[in-house]
């Protein structure tokens, strides 16, 4: 049967949109689509208006208040819009340049763009965001601009020099990350001398000394003094900088993980009762986990949007699930999720047994986490809901978290961040910190295309077990509180809400 004319027109419009996206256009100009195609895509929910003349992709049925499409498209919009208006003659502000050099995944509400072609105008964008174009009369040469994720930024040394002192107070972690990324002081000194920035030199030397980069601080101080400048060191940080192990690491994502872990751990420790210690009776501890399995599976799967029942969970757990004999068992997506959760839960129990016998919990997680993931999705592959390639491992594409300001790091960063997570877990002496920060960091990284929430909760419970704490269920009726606490940790660096959430969830088990 031939498709209806309306379906044929929609198919043609989608093909036109796909062609644009395949050339790297995530956000599209109205002029790049015919009026007919544009109107069809808008009417069917495949496009949303950003500003007049520019659209971003969306999914049909997404609520008007859903911010996910915007944050998924924001940087691509800035790149496309500014390239279209200013050509190569633009860059973002020094402070936003530094945030991008630091691998910060949170975009500020207002983006300031410098260009000699700007008109000092303000453009309103979705979700209360805006773009201010600033007419730069002393625009830098193009060799002092580079691209990060398509955004034109100042080189790191120049951005450090031009950023206001307030940046070190407002974005202390990001400032420390970019200072650690400097390989030497050569380019920094060259920019300082070219502009005669003796006051800035004193601030940067003080900042470098505060984070433990003594040789670079001395280099800046000595170079400016040798050129005849009087330099007075000042420390721009208002909070104590945290010494970082192996400061030669240049990945901003790894540096961020280390800083967050060190800044957050004391808050987590304060929120938790003392560790019970490893149980003497391992089998009794494992039996207690099995006793709460049905409730845990129901809540964990329901949080992810699966419609599961106690009956389905029980049938899967007891081996009675048979889609060929029972129509209710043939709900493939939900049934495969329940079956995969049961298999993964069994794999996690085996890991916990190793931990309870004294093996290092971080080392166990490093060796076993891939097996958890494969077990979680193997039934969906067997049922051909997913392909075998979906079991390959870490994601190969960018992902976005629904309605969250935090955008997970790029896929390339995952390969650096996951080994760092293993190391942080292995070195951490407190089980509560391993559990809370392990779960938070895992979903912050978002290493898989799917299953991150479930595996994050498995990780949390494996680490709780390493201190003798009980298996803790995150209940579906507290989903909004749970997601808000995780978002506060990701977007604002505020771990207290999540630590208290996990501690209170554990208290419900103990009562």
Image: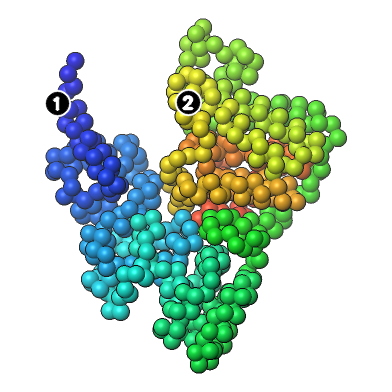
Q: Which mark is residue 312?
A: none
Please, is residue 268 above or below residue 319 in the view?
below
Please, is residue 219 above or below residue 293 in the view?
below
Q: Which mark is residue 5?
A: 1
x and y, in percent, of residue 343 in the image: 61, 24
Near-viewer residue (144 or 86):
144
* Residue 407 seen in render: yes
x and y, in percent, of residue 495 in the image: 60, 54
Residue to which mark 2 is pinned: 388
* Residue 163 seen in render: no
| Nearer to us: label 1 or label 2 | 2
How was the colour assigned to the protein in this rendering?
rainbow
Residue 84 as seen in the image, left or right of residue 166: left
Residue in the image at 52% along x and 86% along y: 224
Residue in the image at 59% along x and 36% along y: 455
Residue in the image at 61% along x and 75% along y: 215
Give the secondary structure at mark 1.
Answer: helix
Give the secondary structure at mark 2.
Answer: helix
Count every numbered label the image shows and give the total. Answer: 2
Task: Give the alpha-carbon distance from disc 1 to disc 2, as whole Å.
Answer: 37 Å
Please, is residue 458 above or below residue 84 in the view?
above
Residue 1 as seen in the image, left or right of residue 95: left
x and y, in percent, of residue 341 in the image: 58, 27
């Amino acid at each position: 049967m031939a498709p209806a004319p309306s379906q044929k027109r929609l198919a043609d419009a989608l093909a036109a949109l796909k062609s644009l996206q395949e050339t790297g256009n995530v956000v599209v100009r109205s002029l790049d689509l015919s009026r007919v195609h544009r109107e069809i895509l808008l009417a069917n929910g495949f496009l949303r208006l950003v500003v007049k003349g520019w659209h971003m992709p969306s999914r049909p049925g997404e609520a008007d208040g859903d911010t996910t499409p915007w944050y998924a498209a924001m940087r691509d919009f800035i790149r496309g819009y500014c390239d279209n208006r200013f050509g190569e003659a633009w860059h973002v502000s020094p402070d936003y340049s530094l945030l991008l050099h630091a691998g910060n995944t949170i975009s500020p509400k207002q983006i300031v763009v410098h260009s000699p072609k700007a008109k000092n105008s303000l453009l309103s964008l979705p979700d209360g965001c805006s773009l201010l174009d600033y007419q730069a009369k002393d625009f830098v040469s193009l060799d002092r601009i580079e691209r990060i994720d398509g955004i034109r930024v100042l080189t790191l040394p120049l951005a450090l020099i031009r950023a206001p002192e307030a940046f070190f107070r407002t974005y202390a972690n990001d400032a420390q990350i970019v200072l650690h990324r400097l390989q030497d002081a050569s380019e920094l000194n060259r920019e300082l001398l070219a502009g005669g920035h003796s006051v800035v030199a004193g601030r940067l030397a003080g900042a470098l000394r505060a984070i433990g980069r003594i040789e670079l601080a001395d280099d800046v101080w000595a170079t400016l003094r040798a050129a005849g400048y009087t330099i007075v060191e000042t420390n721009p940080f208002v909070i104590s900088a945290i010494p970082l192990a192996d400061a030669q690491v240049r990945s901003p994502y790894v540096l961020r993980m280390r800083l967050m872990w060190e800044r957050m751990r004391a808050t987590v420790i304060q929120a938790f009762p003392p560790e019970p210690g490893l149980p003497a009776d391992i089998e009794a501890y494992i039996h207690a986990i099995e006793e709460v399995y049905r409730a845990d599976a129901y809540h964990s799967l329901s949080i992810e949007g699966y419609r599961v029942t106690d009956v389905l969970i029980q049938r899967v757990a007891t081996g009675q699930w048979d889609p060929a004999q029972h129509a209710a068992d043939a709900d493939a997506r939900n049934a495969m999720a329940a079956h995969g959760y049961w298999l993964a839960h069994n794999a996690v129990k085996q890991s916990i047994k190793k931990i309870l016998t004294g093996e290092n919990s971080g080392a166990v997680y490093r060796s076993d986490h891939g097996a958890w993931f494969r077990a979680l999705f193997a039934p969906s592959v067997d049922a051909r809901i997913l392909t075998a390639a979906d079991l390959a491992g870490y994601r190969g594409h960018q992902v976005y978290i629904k309605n969250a300001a935090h955008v997970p790091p790029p896929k390339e960063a995952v390969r650096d961040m996951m080994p760092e997570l293993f190391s942080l877990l292995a070195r951490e002496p407190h089980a509560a910190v391993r559990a809370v920060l392990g779960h938070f960091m895992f979903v912050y990284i978002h290493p898989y295309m799917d299953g991150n929430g479930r595996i994050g909760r498995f990780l949390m419970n494996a680490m709780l077990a390493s201190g003798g704490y009980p298996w803790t269920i995150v209940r579906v009726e507290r989903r909004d509180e749970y997601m808000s606490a995780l978002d506060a940790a990701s977007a604002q660096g505020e771990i207290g809400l999540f630590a208290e959430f996990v501690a209170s969830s554990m208290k419900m088990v103990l009562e």
